[in-house]
């Protein structure tokens, strides 16, 4: 039987021989991510959907990492200023930004955008899908999508819809409805949501797509009538309202959404780490309930899933905009 003391001495010697190699290997590893505060660029003013959702997600990641995620509002040029700042930052994982449909189509609809919608991002996760409600004024003799399309066909060019224009989600959603339904409904452009909603409530414009969060009180009071939901899936907060797809325009699927992205070139292990941590939060019941109150449905996709979704959305809305002759120059 071998002497236990000799075995112990041999093991100690082996560890001593390995220690320099282990130390050298450890010294070449990058420090644990994140090792310092992370900047989260919000390309729109405080108080809007991008700002509120970004700050909520940032707080959750701060708690997970024990490192501060610092919100940085950089509004202007329909989100292009903040987005450009994000994608031109060092690809080290310490700058992130919230993105929306506007970022997916920006450089495809305008020659003045300083970033490439399809090349300049490393996408992390889709945060939320925000269904839009197809609304009409109660005075309009319309109860569903078929009624609206039939009325528009009987009176081509006589009906109006409200939107901020500029290739926004609700603008392109209505243009897609017009294209698939074969109708002519005229755009009335507004600079702000307040004036747009006031004219809808007064009946000066007959219809519009709107995010649920801003109009639910008026739907519940009967001042506006919702006839359909823009997404293929019904909106959990209004389970009795059918989708446009169910209402006869098969394949119709339109939503506003928010996602988290980084500059192209960020190491994939960092992208996947952030994606997993963000998705873990977004899939909690608490996050789902909070987002539903804000008019959205939590997603929490993988980096690969969001990358594919972003590119598909870019192509879909580019084709709608091209057919409608929409440019944002």
Image: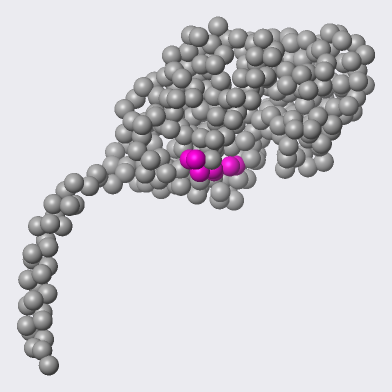
Residue plotted at (37% across, 44% down) = 269
310 horizontally vs 243: left or right: left
Residue 246: quadrant of the picture? top right
Judge by depth and name the residue closer to the eye, 54 or 8: 8
Residue 145: quadrant of the picture? top right
- Where residue 75 sits in the image (x, y, percent)? 47, 18
Residue 215: quadrant of the picture? top right
324 horizontally vs 288: left or right: right
Is residue 133 one of those drawn in magenta? no
Count the marks. 0
Q: How is the image coloured?
A: one colour
- Where residue 175 sits in the image (x, y, percent)? 73, 18
Residue plotted at (28% across, 42% down) = 35
- The quadrant the C terminus occupies is top right
Residue 56 visible: no
Q: Is residue 262 above or below residue 196?
A: below
- Where residue 114 sits in the image (x, y, percent)? 43, 14
Judge by depth and name the residue closer to the eye, 176 or 196: 176
Residue plotted at (84% across, 33% down) = 247
Farthest bottom residue in view: 1
The residue range painted magenta reads 298-304
- The quadrant the N terminus occupies is bottom left
Q: Is residue 223 above or below residue 60?
A: above
- Where residue 70 sits in the image (x, y, percent)? 38, 32
217 horizontally vs 309: left or right: right
Judge by depth and name the residue closer to the eye, 164 or 120: 120
Q: Is residue 166 above or below residue 223?
A: above
Residue plotted at (49% across, 29% down) = 98
Residue 154 visible: yes
């Amino acid at each position: 039987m071998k002497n236990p003391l000799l075995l112990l001495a041999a093991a100690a010697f082996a560890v001593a021989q390995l220690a320099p190699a282990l130390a050298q290997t450890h010294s070449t590893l990058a420090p644990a991510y994140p090792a310092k505060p992370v900047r989260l660029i919000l390309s729109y003013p405080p108080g809007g959907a991008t700002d509120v959702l970004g700050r909520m997600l940032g707080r959750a990641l701060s708690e997970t990492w024990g490192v501060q995620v610092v919100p940085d509002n950089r509004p202007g040029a329909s989100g292009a200023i903040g987005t450009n700042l994000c994608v031109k930052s060092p690809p080290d994982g310490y700058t992130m930004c919230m993105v929306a449909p506007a970022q997916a189509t920006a450089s495809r609809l305008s020659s003045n955008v300083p970033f490439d919608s399809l090349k300049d991002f490393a996408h992390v996760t889709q945060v939320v899908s925000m269904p839009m409600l197809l609304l009409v004024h109660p005075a309009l003799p319309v109860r569903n999508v078929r009624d609206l399309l039939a009325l528009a066909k009987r009176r081509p060019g006589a009906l109006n819809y409200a939107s901020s224009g500029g290739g926004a989600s609700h603008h392109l959603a209505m243009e897609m409805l017009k294209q698939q339904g074969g109708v002519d409904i005229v755009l009335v452009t507004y600079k702000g949501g307040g004036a747009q909603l006031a004219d809808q409530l007064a009946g000066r414009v007959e219809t519009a797509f709107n995010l649920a969060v801003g109009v639910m009180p008026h739907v519940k009071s009967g001042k506006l009538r919702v006839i359909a939901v823009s997404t293929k899936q019904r909106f959990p907060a209004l389970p009795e309202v059918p989708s446009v797809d169910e209402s006869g325009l098969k394949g119709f699927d339109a939503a506003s959404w928010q996602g988290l992205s980084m500059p192209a070139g960020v190491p994939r292990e960092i992208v996947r780490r952030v994606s997993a941590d963000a998705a873990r939060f977004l899939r909690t019941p608490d996050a789902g309930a909070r987002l539903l109150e804000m008019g959205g449905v939590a997603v929490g996709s993988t980096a690969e899933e969001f990358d594919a979704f972003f590119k598909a959305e870019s192509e879909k809305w580019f084709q709608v905009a091209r057919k409608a002759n929409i440019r944002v120059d």
